[in-house]
Amino acid sequence: MGNYFVYILTNPKKTVLYIGVTNDLEQRVIEHYLNRGKPKTFAGRYYCYNLVYFERFPYPMQAIDREKELKSWRRSLKEDLINQENPEWKFLNSEIMDWPPDQNAAAR
């Protein structure tokens, strides 16, 4: 068994949501942060690097299935899910790592 995560990121103004899956949540959030402003990716284009929600799973297929489920939801259901665990939409980045990362963090 391992650690697999489904996560939801938002931009600084909390107007865009991005859902992803990873086996290294800290590193993945750092990658999104370092890609901010880069138009080639959705998260980069919309500055989605602020973690507002995540779930942990022991098996990768569970996480992948949950990611697909959440991506199929309309925005209001995603907001309800975030509100259940994080009603203030506090950015959780500093709760899972030192934040913000330095520019050398990508070399990890």
Image (cartoon, rainbow, N blue to C red):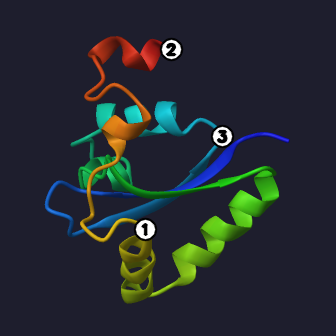
How many angstroms separate mark 1 from mark 3 (CA)? 21 Å
Which residue shows up at 59% across the image and 35% down it? 24
Which residue shows up at 26% across the image and 52% down it? 45
Query: Going from the N terminus, do you reach mark 1 or mark 3 first?
Result: 3
Callout 1: SS? helix
**Residue that label 3 marks:** 23
Instruction: Judge by depth and name the residue closer to the eye, 102 or 57.
Output: 57
How many angstroms separate mark 2 from mark 1 (CA)? 30 Å
Q: Label for residue 29? A: none
Name the amino acid, label 1: Glu
Q: Is residue 53 above or below residue 84?
A: above
Which residue shows up at 30% across the image and 71% down it? 87
Q: Is residue 37 above or below residue 77?
A: above
**Residue that label 2 marks:** 108
**Residue 74 percent across, percent down from the top left:** 44, 87
Instruction: Judge by depth and name the residue closer to the eye, 64 or 39.
Output: 64
Q: Is residue 55 left or right of residue 32?
A: right
Which residue shows up at 56% across the image and 75% down it? 70
